Image (cartoon, rainbow, N blue to C red):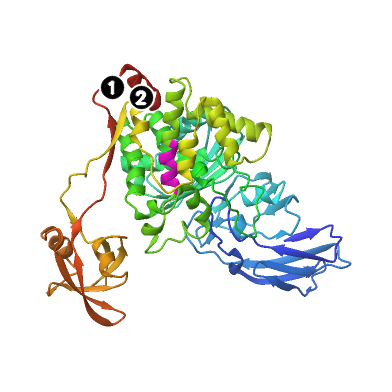
Amino acid sequence: MSVTNLNQPYVDLKMPVWSPGSYLIREYAKNVERFRSLDKTGNTITYQKISKNTWRIPTESLDQIEVVYAVYGFETSVRTNFFDSDHAFIVPTATFLYIDNWIDHPTTVSIDLKDTWTSISTGLEQIEEHKFYAPNFDILYDSPIEAGNQDIWKFQAAGVEHECAMVGGGSYDKARLTKDITRIVEEETRIWGSNPNKRYVIITHNYQSGGGGLEHLNSTVLGASRNAYLNETSYKNYLSLVAHEYFHLWNVKRLRPKALGPFNYDAENYTTGLWIMEGFTSYYDNLIIKRCGFYSEKEYLSLLANDFNIVLNRPGHAIQSAAASSFDTWIKYYRPDENSINSGISYYNKGAMLTALLDIKIIAATEGKLKLDDVIREAYEEFFLKLDRGFEENEFKSLGERIAGTSLDDIFDAAHQDGELDYNDYFNLVGYEIIDTNVNNNTLTLGITTNKVDGLISVATVEKDSGAYEAGLNVRDELIAINNNRLDVKDKEIDFIVQHAKEGELLNFLVARDGLVREIPVQIRKNTKKIYEIRPLKDQTFLQELLGKIWMA
């Protein structure tokens, strides 16, 4: 790192502690090694480490300094560095230091490629063959870099040049992907009214088994399984992931809560609005795939119903709201443990549920003239294009109410409260219903899940208010026997015993806890898990049928 035009007694160089879009303090500074500071003649300057991510370098009478350091990276994800002999995935927030209070300073990045590597893929502006420019560190930190021998091809969509960079091989069909991604890009651009980029880069890391994605200002990084493109279900899942991250190009990277920019890279950036950012995006990703013709109506409704299944089958939905989940993402969402099912929900899934209701309510209130598309497009134009700032949640709600001509208190209040709405009050408006197809089931349950490792069976999770929970069965308890019958890790004895018991019956568990053996009687209870299905009403009015077609269009 070379810093010039210095005119101050010292500089503080800082490493970000997190990456925008991934709301967890990751302590990237822990991977910095062999830090050295030098003057322009190569003489060592003694520096001081003044915090976990800050290096202070005295610069009195110096107009230039050089800083040399190594960064270790070997974590497979879309938000962390990974370097090996095949390629380098460079996450700028985990790699590049910035000067405190100089976040708006322009910078150039030069990349010295390994002899056997040929390509660099990044959203940064290229100014020379291997040299790139960022007008400020916010842009630099939002521009991941892939260096190696990735498979690259380019195409035009919605008037924007798109680059696909495939890393790790794979069974993908370039022509098919180009055609299908183009349809997604053009549908999303139609929704938002304009595309803000001249160029967009899609970096996909193909693994034996992989997934996930992270949005950036003019690029995205995706994870996928290299042979999944041959399977229609997993191929559509990949397209849905593309649709999700591309939707973020507008929703969060530009239209955003005030708390999400400009960023504080030193600490958490709190907002209750991730249910809007990620919830809206999670609702639209599969809806866009349906609009593009990749999903049938039945497939799409099944995917939407799955959000309800995921949330409403977690005891945590009675404890944590979508807004609270958003605010606590820094300590909960990215740090799940064995009790997460009992203590929280995902703002992705709960946000998608609320977004579906919001879309339906707008359609019904305007008799099909408008839908949520119109609200987010107006919000984008108002807050980003005109005002160039983030929004407060009440501002977003007020804008939606103005466009829809009706109060949206019910849905926004529900986002901040623990209780549940009557979902059929909304689905019925467009001629659909959501029902629990498992309501009359006679299955039984203990309320636990198990792990089977090295010939041992242990408890993985215990569901709140279940028989196991009330009996005091603990996570990590080794399950040895039930009713004096030794358990065999190779079969499904526990499931067999439970399903052939009677409701209310006590099963005597022999368990080992921290090396001590004990007996715990556990009551078998009825399985209250729900299996939701969203389907058309059998008898629809003309208006319900009309509005339903608009919702599904």
Residue 229: percent from left, percent from top: 36, 43
| Residue at the image position 52 percent from the left and 42 percent from the top | 277
Q: Quadrant location of the N terminus?
A: bottom right
Q: Nearer the viewer, mark 1 or mark 2?
A: 1
Q: How crowded is mark 1: few (under 14 residues within 10 Å), some or many (20 or more)?
A: some
Give the residue type at disc 2: Gly
Q: In the displayed structure, does residue 300 sit left or right of residue 18? A: left
Q: In the displayed structure, does residue 118 sit left or right of residue 110? A: left
From the image, tell me which residue sits under label 2.
548
From the image, tell me which residue sits under label 1.
540
Residue 10 visible in the displayed image: yes
Give the residue type at disc 1: Gln
| Residue at the image position 39 percent from the left and 59 percent from the top | 340
Magenta segment: 347-355
Q: Is residue 348 magenta?
A: yes
* Residue 169 to residue 386: above or below: below
Between 103 and 275, which is closer to the camera in this rendering? Answer: 275
Q: Does the magenta stretch include residue 418?
A: no
Q: In the displayed structure, does residue 260 sit left or right of residue 420? A: right
* Residue 355 to residue 141: above or below: above
- In terms of secondary structure, where does tag 2 sit? helix
Which quarter of the figure has residue 219?
top right
Residue 190 visible in the displayed image: no
Decide which of tag 1 and tag 2 comes sooner along the chain. 1
Between 71 and 485, which is closer to the camera in this rendering? Answer: 485
Which quarter of the figure has residue 93?
bottom right
| Residue at the image position 49 percent from the left and 45 percent from the top | 275
Which quarter of the figure has residue 26?
bottom right
Q: Quadrant location of the C terminus?
A: top left
Cβ atoms under marks 1 and 2 closer than 8 Å: yes
Q: How crowded is mark 2: few (under 14 residues within 10 Å), some or many (20 or more)?
A: many
